[in-house]
Image (spheres, helix red, strand yellow):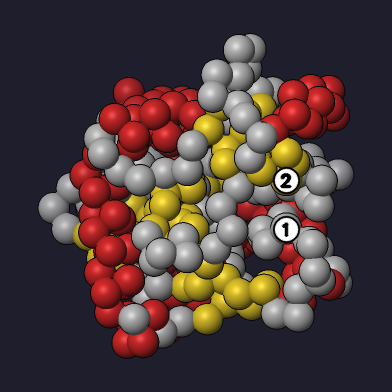
């Protein structure tokens, strides 16, 4: 096939989470070329997309556009335009991306469908906010933006933290109940006809300092030299060791896939309570696909090479 790898337009001084898109684009291009495809790559620019498609005439676009002008909330623009041009592409459609890119909306839709997710509250009224611990999150941005040791606060401090993050990072911020429990990141791969749930990864917190929130924050995700990065370790095996818990996680993944009409490659993040009940935190329809990221690690655990994973993403898109 003739495949165009389309990625975010990242400036040279872009932050690590944006630079990672370029790493992924290079790795995907190499993997596809190694499987015999004719590959080109380009940055997404709305005003030039039509001319790019006419020039490249791809059979398929491998969509790695995670943001436009540095804003993740604009990422759905790429699949929307590609669909309008009737160009096949990998990943989810614009509607599913728009819904899942808005975390409070995602949680509201899940709660309405009977899926378990932690309580949350949003400005300006912050209805339901009480004295519990909350994690203050960006409503429409991924990459663990703003997640550091100060993001977990008691209810009375939520508004102050959210206002400070809005000033520093921009965008909307909300508060989600902080659940002290086990964390799972589960990779999903498929289309409307089939779903493959990859080996389930649990993120563990080795030698974690007392009092430090157990979260995979920005430093853990993007600063390899940080203590948090070294101490957040991925492990597999819950399917064998705890089949009942694995069955609950699998069922929740299947429900999410159906509810949002997901396609392509997706990661669903969970917290599991002390009682063993999974709570859905987020749905990431643009998860990192670099060779050293969690999705590739799950594929490797399943016996798939990186090149085979990339080929499978193309296959399910067809």
Query: Residue drawn at (46%, 60%), measured in percent from left and top?
Result: 273
Relative to residue 145, is residue 86 depicted above or below?
Answer: above
Query: Residue drawn at (53%, 33%), measured in percent from left and top?
Result: 120
* Whole-number angstrom distance, CA of label 1 to CA of label 2: 7 Å
Mark 2 falls on what kind of element?
strand
Mark 1 falls on what kind of element?
loop
Q: Is residue 243 visible?
A: yes
Relative to residue 177, is residue 243 depicted above or below?
Answer: below
Relative to residue 165, is residue 118 depicted above or below?
Answer: below
Question: Which image quadrant for residue 157?
Answer: top right
Q: Earlier in the sequence, mark 1 or mark 2?
A: 2
Q: Which one is in front, 50 or 235?
A: 235
Q: Which one is in front, 247 or 85?
A: 247
- Residue 165 position, x and y percent, is 79, 30
Residue at the far front: name it: 131
Query: Residue drawn at (60%, 19%), measured in percent from left and top?
Result: 126
Query: Residue drawn at (69%, 23%), measured in percent from left and top?
Result: 171
Q: Which residue is mark 1?
A: 213
| Mark 1 touches mark 2? (CB < 8 Å) | yes
- Residue 242 position, x and y percent, is 34, 81
């Amino acid at each position: 096939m003739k495949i165009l790898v389309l990625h975010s337009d990242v400036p040279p001084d872009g932050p690590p989470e944006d630079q990672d898109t370029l790493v992924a684009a290079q790795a995907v291009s190499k993997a596809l070329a190694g499987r015999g495809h004719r590959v080109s790559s380009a940055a997404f620019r709305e005003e030039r997309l039509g001319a790019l498609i006419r020039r490249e005439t791809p059979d398929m676009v491998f969509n790695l556009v995670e943001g436009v002008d540095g804003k993740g909330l604009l990422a759905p623009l790429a699949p929307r335009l590609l669909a309008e041009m009737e160009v096949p592409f990998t990943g989810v459609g614009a509607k599913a991306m728009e819904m899942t890119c808005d975390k409070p909306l995602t949680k509201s839709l899940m709660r309405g469908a009977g899926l378990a997710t932690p309580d949350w509250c949003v400005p300006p009224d912050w209805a339901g906010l009480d004295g519990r611990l909350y994690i203050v999150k960006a409503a429409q941005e991924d990459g663990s933006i703003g997640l550091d040791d100060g993001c977990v606060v008691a209810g009375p401090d939520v508004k102050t933290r959210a206002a400070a993050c809005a000033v520093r990072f921009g965008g909307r911020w909300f508060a989600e109940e902080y659940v002290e429990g086990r964390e799972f990141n589960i990779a999903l791969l498929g289309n409307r006809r089939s779903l493959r749930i990859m080996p389930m990864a649990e993120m563990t917190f080795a030698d974690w300092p007392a009092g430090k929130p157990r979260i995979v924050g920005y430093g853990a995700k993007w600063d390899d030299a940080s203590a948090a990065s070294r101490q957040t370790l991925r492990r597999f095996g819950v399917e064998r060791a705890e089949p009942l818990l694995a069955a609950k996680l699998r069922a929740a993944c299947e429900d999410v896939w159906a509810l949002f009409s997901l396609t392509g490659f997706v990661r669903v993040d969970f917290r599991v309570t002390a009682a063993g009940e999974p709570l859905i935190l987020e749905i990431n329809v643009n998860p990192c696909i670099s060779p050293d990221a969690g999705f590739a690690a799950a594929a490797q655990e399943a016996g798939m090479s990186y090149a085979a994973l990339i080929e499978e993403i193309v296959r399910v898109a067809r």
